[in-house]
Image: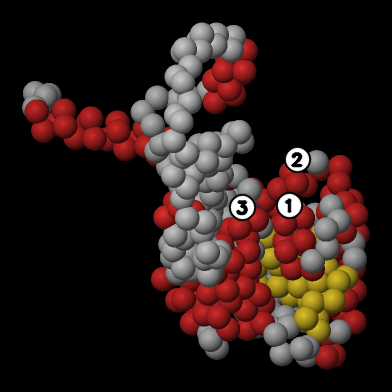
Amino acid sequence: MEPMTASHADTDARADLMSYLDFHVEAGVDAALDERPHDRFAEAEAAAQAPAPRAEPAPPREPLPREPLPREPLPQRDPAPGEDAPLEFRRELPSRDPPPREPPRTYGNAAGAKPGEAADDARARAAQMTTLAELEALLRGFEGCGLRFTAKNLVFADGNPQARVMFVGEAPGADEDRIGKPFMGRSGQLLDRMMAAIGLDRSSAYISNVVPWRPPGNRNPTPQEISICRPFVERQIELADPDILVCLGAPATQTLTGTKDGILKARGRFYPYRLGDGREIRALATLHPAYLLRQPVQKRLAWRDFRMLKAALDGSAAGR
Ligand code: URA
């Protein structure tokens, strides 16, 4: 056996470190804040329970000066928006309010723009794309959503973009992230079986997600991430131009139809879906296959929805 050398040891240490980092990324850690973990709940509780500091006896009062205190000139007017405040305005009075809390950290937008700006920018750029290939290329270079920095791959679409039906899920999971295509894992296999039950497969359906990058640790995408990615999936729908859209699960249904209903209420209905050019198609809400894997008894509801889908496709077959 080869003797262990310094460079072997370095390689092993590096491999250990990399797998340690991978483990954290898989678990959803996407930023390093400190070397030690903090239990902020315990810290806040301990601070609330600590006895209030005893007041020091007040120092002896100095006699008041006899001379009147010099008065500062009164400020003339409020500063105009954008103009620096005069110095006397900038002096801060001691406040009784608790110090402002840091805004919650979100990673929706690594480019540093405000969320609304990033979504507007995404919409403006997506609108200029005239083919699905252009849209995919745009997304490959898009840095306005922080998820792209933790994902391994862009997950743009699978299936046939000419198909009459388009399925939209929520966001890729680990298998999809590794392979770069939507619905590749266990929920994808179930989706394939559900499609097969009504005579569809990936050559007769087009498949995508609201968010095209995997959220780390399979967490749900944040509302901010969804609002940044939404213009892209909307443009993708316009360019694919299906007759019928199928929203898989609550996030896709709520994002694309605007309903606030939970999925058990929203499913089994067609919603009007307006394309950018004003035309209207229909969007059917149904249960997400991942939910059906956890709640197999609900498959009967999904089966009803898929029969509605088949009837709608059969009914509108002549129209295409
Ligand atoms: N779940 C989704 O919503 N989309 C996928 O691509 C895979 C799992």
Q: Earlier in the sequence, mark 2 or mark 1?
A: 1
Is residue 87 toward the left or the right of residue 51 in the image? left
Relative vertical location of residue 201 with respect to residue 291 in this rendering, above or below: below
Residue 109 can be seen, yes or no: no
Nearer to the camera, 115 or 84: 84
Q: Residues within 10 Å of mark 1 (few under 14, many from 20)?
A: many
Q: Nearer the viewer, mark 1 or mark 3?
A: 3
Quarter of the image for the C terminus: give it: bottom right
Q: Earlier in the sequence, mark 3 or mark 2?
A: 3
Q: Earlier in the sequence, mark 1 or mark 3?
A: 3
Nearer to the camera, 274 or 61: 61
Relative vertical location of residue 202 with respect to residue 319 in this rendering, above or below: above
x%, y% of residue 254?
A: 77, 61
x%, y% of residue 93?
A: 52, 41
In percent of the image, x 76 and y 73: which residue is there? Answer: 245
Q: Secondary structure at mark 2?
A: helix
Distance between the alpha carbons at the discs numbered 2 and 1: 9 Å
User: Which label was assigned to residue 289?
Assistant: 1
Q: Residues within 10 Å of mark 2 (few under 14, many from 20)?
A: few
